[in-house]
Structures are given as structure tokens and as C-alpha cells.
Amino acid sequence: MGSQKETKLAYGLAAILLIVGVVCYAAVPAEKPDEPVRKVYKSLGGDVMFDHQMHAQVDDCAACHHHGETGDYMSCAECHRAADVKTVPSECTACHPVIYDDYIFDEHHVVLETEPEAWTCKDCHALAEGEDIPASCSECHDPDYGDAMIMKFQKTSDALHDQCIGCHEDYGAGPVACGECHAQ
């Protein structure tokens, strides 16, 4: 009689364990949440969109972020002459054809293929319609640095430390340790 009771107890425990296993399996999400794609940073020069997928594929920051050959930031006047800022054409490509050509044929082609009508220069470099060009560079750039192109928005280190690492930990992808980004 004792062995029949033990058998029923064993079957009962097995059934409970099976039910707990099924419930635990069902509680785990089947898919990861959508990965972050774009984040907009506010700046005095207009909203700047950070495209995570594009930045993760680029090897050379200077391909888009214009620095001099020495690695120093170029002065505003090296690209923007005083006579040039009196009037602004309606199309960005009138002054920046090389940048646009590079944009069309580099990593951005992925975005253009998926959202051809959605992306323009103003999507990343916002300048309100009808807004005048600022009278001085320092309206967008930090005046404490003279001619240096230091934008008044969140520093890269802050952006990386505040946002990227958290997402990389959450998604289990991307660098999270200091030495993975910083040279030792």
C-alpha cells in the first residue's frame, strides 16, 4: 500500500514540475524588443539625429564629422565665408554637393532604400522653415572655443556613457567595458 502512495506522489510532483516548466517557458518573451535605430539630440543649431545602425558600421568618424588633417576642428571660416551666409539657398545641395553625393552612396543608402521619401538633410540638421541663418557662429557653436566647431549639445562621451552602454547591456550587444572603446 505504501508503494502505491509513493507512486501517486511521484506522478503528482512530476505533473507539478511539468506545469511549472510550461508556465516558465510561456512567460519568457519570444523575441527581443525592437533594437534602437534613431535618437534625436536637441542643440541650438537644430535637432541632430543619431542613427545607431549607421554609426555602428562606420570605421572613420572624420568621414562625416569634419576635422582638419591634424585632428583639430576646423574654423567656421574655413568652410563658411561671411559673404556665403547672407542668403541661404532652399536646397542644401547648392552649397554641399559633395556631402550629398557621399550621403547617397555611403552607409545611408540603406536608409534611402527603406525610406526614400522620409529622409532629407533637415531630418538630421533641422533648420525651421523661414528661419534666418544666425548672425554669428557662436549662436550654434560654443563661443568659449573661438573658431573651434564645438557644438552646444551633449558631448559624445556623455551620450555614450548615458545611453549606449545601458542599451548595449539591455540587448547584450555592443561594448560595455571601458577598454572596449577606450585604448588602454
Image: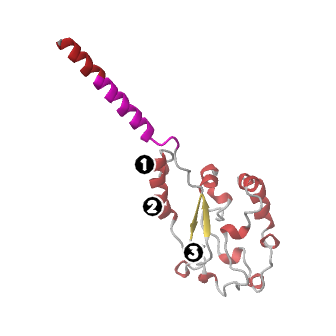
Where residue 96 sits: x, y (%)? 78, 69
Of the numbered discs 1 and 2, the one sitting upstream in the chain is 2
| Whether residue 11 is situated above or below residue 66 in the rendered picture | above
| Res 3 visible | yes
Q: Is 5 on the left-hand or right-hand side of 128?
A: left
Instruction: Read off the magenta span.
Output: 12-31
Q: Is residue 106 magenta?
A: no
Q: Please tell me whether mark 2 sits on a helix, a strand or a loop.
A: helix
- Mark whose residue sits in front, 1 or 2: 2
Q: Residues within 10 Å of mark 3 (few under 14, many from 20)?
A: some
The residue that mark 3 highlights is 43
Q: CA distance from mark 3 to mark 2?
A: 17 Å
Which residue is labeled 2 in the image? 162
Q: Residue at x 49, y 56 (%)?
A: 164
Percent across and percent down for residue 23 are 40, 37
Label 2 environment density (alpha carbons within 10 Å; few <14, some 14–19, many ≥20):
few
Q: Amino acid at mark 1?
A: Ala
- Does the segment drawn in magenta span residue 17? yes
* Kind of residue indicated by mark 2: Asp
Say if 125 sits above or below 146 in the image. Answer: above
Quarter of the image where one finds residue 74: bottom right
10 Å crowding of disc 1: few (<14), some (14-19), many (20+) = few
**Sequence-first tag of 1 and 3:** 3
Give the residue pinned by disc 1: 177
How far across and down, in percent of the image, does residue 84 sit? 77, 81
Q: Quadrant of the N terminus?
A: top left
Identify the amino acid type marked 3.
Ser
Is any part of residue 184 visible from this angle?
no
Query: Circle 1 — which element?
Result: loop
